[in-house]
Image (cartoon, rainbow, N blue to C red):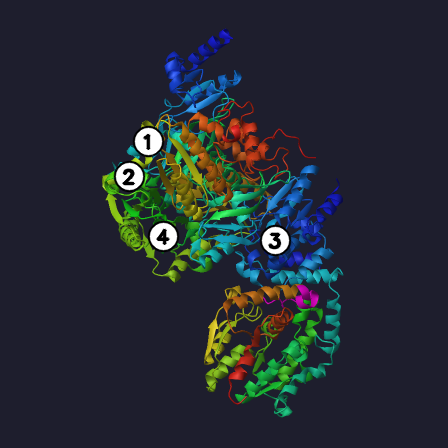
Amino acid sequence: MNIIQLRKLFYEEVAKCNKCGFCLPSCPLYYVQKVESASPRGMNAITRAVIEGRLKWSPEIERSIFSCLGCGACTVACFPSVKTREMVFQDRECLVHEGLYPKVVDRLASYIQENHNISDEDNEERGDWREFLKDLPENNLEKDHAEVIYFVGCVSSFFPMAQKIPANMARIMERCRVDFTILGGEEWCCGFPLIGAGVPENIKALMDHNLEKVKEVGAKKIVFTCPSCYHIWKTFYEPDVEILSSSELLQQLLLEHPVSLKEINATVTYHDPCDLGRNSGVFEPPREVLKAIPGIHLVELPNNRQLAMCCGGGGNLEMVDPELSGKVAQIKIEEILKTGADMVVSSCQQCLRTISTRARRQKIDLVVKDLTDLVAEAIPTL
Amino acid sequence: MDTQELIDRIKKIVEPDYVLSSEMDLTLYSYDASLERDRPEVVVLPSSTEEVSGVVALAYREKIPVVARGSGTNLSGGTIPTKGGIVVHFSRMNRILEIDIPNRTVTVEPGVITLDLQNHLLNQGLVYAPDPASQKVSTLGGNLGENSGGPHCLKYGVTTNHVLGAEVVLYDGTVVWTGGKSQDHPGYDLTGLLVGSEGTLGLVTKIILKILRAPEAIKTILALYDTIEDASNTVSAIIAEGIVPATLEMMDNLIMTAVEESIHAGYPLDAAAVLIIELDGMSDGMDRQARKILEVCKRHHVREIQLAKDDAERERLWAGRKGAFGAVARLRPSYMVCDGTVARTKLPQVLSRVLETGKKYGVLIGNVFHAGDGNLHPLILFDERDEAELERVRKAASEILKICADAGGTISGEHGIGVEKIKEMPLIFSDSDLEAMRQVKRAFDPEDILNPGKILPGTLGVPQNG
Amino acid sequence: MANSTTHRLESLKGIVGPEYIKTDPETLSTYAVDSVMPWAVVFPGDPGQLSEVVRLACEEKLALVPWGSGSKMAMGALPSCLDLVICTRRLNRILDMDKANLTLTVQAGVRFKEIQSSLVLQEKRNDRERKGCFIPISPPCRHSATLGGIIAANSSGPTRLLYGLPRDIVLGVHYVGPNGEIIRMGGKTVKNVSGYDMCKLMIGSHGSLGILCEMTLRLLPLPESAGTFLSVFAGLSEASRFVDRVFETSLLPAAVEILNSMAFELMAPDVAAGLRTGRFAVAAALEGFQEAVDRMESEIREMALESGAEKDSYLQDHQHHDFWNHYSNLVPGLSECYPDLVSLKLNYPISTYIEVIELADSLISDTQLDYALLAHAGSGIAQIHFLVDQGDTKATDRIALVAERLLDRCKRIGGNLVIERAKPELKQRLPVWGLPREDMILIRRIKKEMDPLGLFCPGRFIRGI
């Protein structure tokens, strides 16, 4: 990507920004940083100035553009709905082209290139979370053919804090007799991290591989516990099978297989993951699932659904600037605490990690759960 | 002093992370929500009055302009550093310092977002009345600088009616309080003078605002009309009935059509104007007032009336008004909001001349405005990148101001003069009038350090900055 | 010297006409400012004449004092110098009474009472009745006060609680500045941010920056219904319990006044008959739509009884108006009986009113002086009038002591104390405008910039500027 291409793609878009500033209060990054360069309006202005030749790509711009969480809240607040998030991802491509990018991008790209996942580990280790499921026969999880593919995603596969999520998801599907399989070592990174990092060139190979696997398995549905995988499959892959988030599948399962759920007496608030809610439009299924659990009292965050505020884990910021990501998580935590809820539930392993890590580091007593965790708790025999 | 030295010296006053001087940062502080652009030499984000004072004192010694800035939502270029210098961005000074219910005041730092304060107060059954359209993002310091208005100002007055006192950093860094929690201090009403002075008289670092109890009842009425005249006449007639509603807002057909296309508020596409009328206060007698208003509307050939039955319906009636700018923003890449005020009985006549002006310059103009207090906001739609069109827009905007001035009104109701309207100041002020204002400016800022080049045309008669 | 005086007189005659300049001793003594007599009194007939008079005065370096009806002339320190009194009473034209837009433009010499009486009248136009309207301030001396004087003195009264202050209703002013130029500021619209809000500067500037010649005010529709609820309490704590309860509700009374027994007796002798001293009365003006006024009356009555009211009464129609007329005319009435009347105005944070009134009450009862105390509850303002018998020379000492102690307390809690009326002896002993605050540096700078020769009311305003 270069400036000429950027101009072609985004000049009309960025010209719509009237600099009214209505995006400022919606942007968690601006809330934390308080400088114009951290605001959506600032990022629009940077892009426009670069396109018009008034600014040159610089290390300051790199810092600003690579800090964006990609949460998309600004576009919702924006009168003409300027697509700042999409534009920032293109900016990143330009910056990478200019050699201006955080070192972590190279590492990420090479891991994905070599291991087909975002960690430094062999992709065969993808199924390590099965440790949590010793009671289930292994072949129940990896089959040649199945109706449903459970696409686990890199984070839940390799980051211990999130590994409970696939374990619980698998248990729930087992319990509801879903004919599903995981792809194990044949599941490759969905490619979303590459788009966020400004290096989408290699995404094609990943997509081709994953799509090929879907064909081999002959699945009719793919289910995701990771909203970012879900989002990119929905918008980029567009396979001719049904794409479901875990919350949507859980909602279907609870409707089709009325299991009598255990009562869980708790006041719960729900955090909308950006890629599931605002960026994919899935707001109600997770709430319906929560409401289906007896004893759960749902209180909404002041900023919910379209207006939900990012946890700080979006847009690769956690890799680029963990401290800044933590500061955003802090305001998320404060918003959660104000509701007086006993726990916060999300439907995203990244939100879970970001929020609980910050809470732990700041010694804040906060229970953070994934929707799958809570449902698994509520199913009697699990 | 060269720029680098200036930056180094400022970094001794304010945490270096909050002293910005990269090309990128200077570009990002060269704009606000107006069409004006100019770059500062350095941007500072202070965290305390002491830091602001230190920066201003340094600027005074070195004769460098200082421009205060909140969220940069200014619509007349008031926050543009047209003479370079230091931009002071108040985003870090954003604490609500005290809510004093017995004295009905709240003390805030200038960077507090207007709506944040309002939401915070509403939890305790209190309100800060001024509600500028940008309240979601605007800062209270900015509201003070501009003397911002808003729909509810019809009944409750503008910002100046709600500011009781301010801590202000003067041109040489001296810090003084004007006004305070006690009213009627002997001496000049310096607080009143500071409000609306667009940062040219001092930098406000703390503000004492008046708070009121939230009204116990609200009633919202939406009225649709086939002609703008009928809608405008309704506005005057309601007030002639002895009723001063909290708001009397109007939109014309262009705006309504745009709103309808974007948010489907339920407006008929062929209506000429819509009025949103809101009553608030004690619940007793409100139904009767509403009935009176309906009678007035009928007398002026209203086509359709909707009365909100609950909060949800009230939200729905307001949705169109609140979404108006957004809806219009979809029609063309840029829009310019004009801001003139006339006596409300002159509205029909002035509006038709505004529309003629649009035709004359071949620009699209929609009208969304605070009809109750005669404050027009013609929205001119265009593409900023088309220089020829931009020029026509500027001419049309200037002519609209002249129309307001000719009708006995004024050239700015709530957006300020800034840089954009300096050239129109002589439309309403004589040389002597302007000289009197220059005297005030010289008294507050003898060397023209604070936001120079704003509000007043001509020279100040003080040593000019290099 | 004599020549130049004659020449000056001729020039002034040339401007206003010989009959409108007075130099006879009788007139001069009527227009003496704190016993200082001017050299001449001029009565310009229009703003143009006013402008020329001021221009001439500036050329000749004559010290000026503007004068409306004279009702506020007791305010201010002794003039350091006085040549010319400029009386605005001939500037009495109503320029624009725009009931449709609820604005009024008048010249400075128009009397409040006269214009108010014509505003409140209903009109018939095109077969439709247009409701009356009013200037929403309730200044003292409403019978005589001119609008110019009211604005220049920032006069307000009980209804400031609901309707605000002159700063909330002045939309525009024309004034003659120190070189004789007529300066036009503000306009006819409520929303106006074109240039500095110079109207604010003129309000309460007591003629120290210029002479008001014209002003535009915001009007309000006349309330549909009005009444006054009076109640009497055994002491301040009972009265304040009642007042605080009223302010905790969402009721919107137009005024809530706390009066000591002397003040109450002066204003409502019928209700106050047989009242023992030490009592406090509360007068609440209720204005608005009929239903709202009815509810306020019943709820406020209930609160008064629950707070221990010993007596209560509800005034309507002419009784209501008479009461507030008395209120407004208390000072002129008293000053007729007591030429040595001393009036103090205290300001303080709203919530501290009990402490201030208690202190005043205890300090003054030691002095054995009769005094009327009236406090605008909810605004943080109290007025104390000492009914000093003529020739009581000891009273001055005692009052000075009380005033000092009260000033000290008000100052400590963020307020101040102004001596609004006193004989020159007392004025010389005390800071008439209270203690200056840190913004005094700006006040001095503004005065110097706008009146460089110091010809407008020299010595009279705060710190002798």
Disc 1/disc 4 C-alpha distance (Å): 30 Å
Q: Mark 1 vs mark 4: same chain?
A: yes
Q: Mark 1 vs mark 2: same chain?
A: yes
Disc 4/disc 3 C-alpha distance (Å): 42 Å
Left/right of residue C422 with respect to residue A112 in the rendered view: left
* Highlighted range, magenta: A309-323
Crowd band around label 4 with a 10 angstrom C-alpha radius: few (<14), some (14–19), many (20+): some
- Residue C91 is tagged as none
The relative height of residue B277 versus residue A125 in the rendered view (above or below) is above
Disc 4/disc 2 C-alpha distance (Å): 22 Å
Q: Amino acid at mark 3?
A: Arg
The residue marked by circle 3 belongs to what chain? Answer: B
Disc 2/disc 3 C-alpha distance (Å): 56 Å
Disc 1/disc 2 C-alpha distance (Å): 13 Å
Q: Amino acid at mark 2?
A: Glu
Q: Nearer the viewer, residue A279 or C60?
A: C60
The residue marked by circle 4 belongs to what chain? Answer: C
- Secondary structure at badge 3 equals helix
Q: Is residue A315 magenta?
A: yes
- Residue C241 is tagged as 4
Rendered image quadrant of residue B219: bottom left
